Image (cartoon, rainbow, N blue to C red):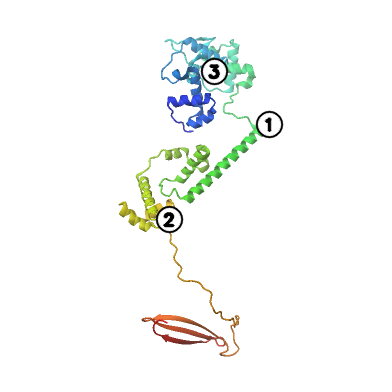
Amino acid sequence: MKVRELTWADRIRAVKEYLEGEGSQEEIAKRYEVDRASLREWIARYQVSGDSLMWEQKRTRYTEALRSRVVKEYLEGKGSQRELCKKYGISTRRILQGWLMCYNVQEGTQKGGDKGENRMNKGRKTSLEERIEIVSYCIRNGKNYMKAAEKYKVSYSQVYQWVKKYEEYGANGLLDRRGRRKQFCEMSELEKLQAEVRLKEAEVKRLEMENDLLKKLSALEKGGGCRLSRVRQEKQYLAIQALNREKGYPIAALCRIIGLNRSSYYKWINRDPGAQQEADKQLIHCLQVLHEESRGIYGYRRMQINLQRRFNILCNKKRIRRVMAAIGMKSVIRKKRPRHVRSTPEVTAENILNRQFYANKTNEKWLTDVTELKYGNGEKMYLSAILDLKDKKVHLQNKKTKGPT
C-alpha cells in the first residue's frame, strides 16, 4: 500500500477511532491510507503519552539506570518491546531497539568505554556449529555472556538468547528458522488440510482477479475511452485503477497478472497531463456543445466548419473524426422517405405455362417483355422482344410515341 503522510490531528483521530471500537486496525489503516505498522506505533505512543505529549517533536533524555533496567527485563523475557515501552513511558519502540543494539552488560551492569560512552558489539551472522561452540563456551565459564561475546565478536543479546533457547529446546533451539517454512512432510494431517485450503483460496482469489481484469479490459476496449491518450498501455492502467478502487484488489497482484511493473503504474498515476491532452479536453467540450445545439445531426465535416466559425478552432477533420469516435459521438442519419408505395395488383395473370418452357411447333408458345426507353425532348420508345420457345429466336417490335402518355 502506498503510505500517505498524515497530519498530527489526523493521526490522533485515527488512534481514537480504533480505541473507541469504530473499526479494526486493518480497516482504519485502509480508511486513512496508511501502513498498519504505523498505526500500531501511533496507538502505542498514544497509550504512553496521550494527546499532549504524543506528537511533540522534542528529544526526551532517559537515565542510564532506566535504560539498563528496561534492557535487562527484555532480555529476561519479562515483556515484549511494546509492553516495556508502555510500562516505562518510552515514546517509540525504535528507541528501545537502539538500546538493545548498543547495549553490552554483564550481570546487570552497563560498562562504559574510555570516554564514558556505551560499548557496542554488533551482532553478526553465524552458522549452527559456531552457535553450539559459543553456547558451550559460555556455559563452561559460568554463563559469562560478556566474555563469550567479546571472544567470538558477537553481541551480548545474541549469546543470551542462544543460551536461553538451548536450555529450553536443546540443540534444536539453535537452528536458524528465520524465513523457513515447515516442510510438507513435517506437517500434521490438520496442518496439511489447512495448507491445501489456503492454497485453494489463494488460487480462487487469483482467478477471480484475472477474470475481473479481463472483463474490465474488454469494457474499456468497447468504450474506446483510451484512443485519445498517447500513453502506452493506458487501457491496462485504467483497468488496474478501477479494480483497485471498486473491489480493493492489491495493485501489486493486478500488475503481476497483467505483466506490468508496479513502478510504471505509479509513474502513470503521478504524471502531468501534456498540452495535447488539454487541447483534446477543450475540443471535446466544444464538440459536445455543437452536438447538443444541432440535435445530433452534425457529422465531422460540418463540425469542422462550425468549430472554425463559432470557436475559432482550426482543426483537421481527421482529428475531429477520431475524437468523436473516441467519445462515442455519432451524427443522426435521417431516414429517407419512401418514393414507391407498394400496392396489390387488380388483375393477376393466369400461370398458363407453369414453367413448361418448350414447344413442339413454331408459334405455339411466345415469351415477351416490354421496356420503356426515353430519348430526345420528352419522347419515348417501347421495346418489346418476343421469344419463340420452339426455335428460341427473338423477334423485335417497337412503337414510337411523342410527349408524355
From the viewer's side, name the closer residue of 249 and 99.
Answer: 249
For discs 3 and 2, the disc positioned in front in the rendered view:
2
For discs 1 and 3, the disc positioned in front in the rendered view:
3
From the viewer's side, name the closer residue of 93 and 308.
Answer: 308
Classify mark 1: helix, strand or loop: helix
- The circle drawn on residue 83 is 3
Residue 166 in the figure: left or right of residue 312 = right
Q: Is residue 119 above or below residue 275?
A: above
Percent position of residue 262, x then y:
47, 38
Q: Earlier in the sequence, mark 1 or mark 3?
A: 3
**Residue type at tag 1:** Leu
Percent position of residue 16, x then y:
50, 24
CA gap, disc 2 to disc 1?
63 Å
Circle 1 is placed at which residue position?
Answer: 190
Q: Do the residues labelled 1 and 3 touch (CB within 8 Å)?
A: no
From the viewer's side, name the closer residue of 377 and 69.
Answer: 377
Percent position of residue 161, x then y:
57, 17
x 58%, y 11%: residue = 143
| Mark 3 Cα-neighbour bin, 10 Å: few <14, some 14–19, many ≥20 | some
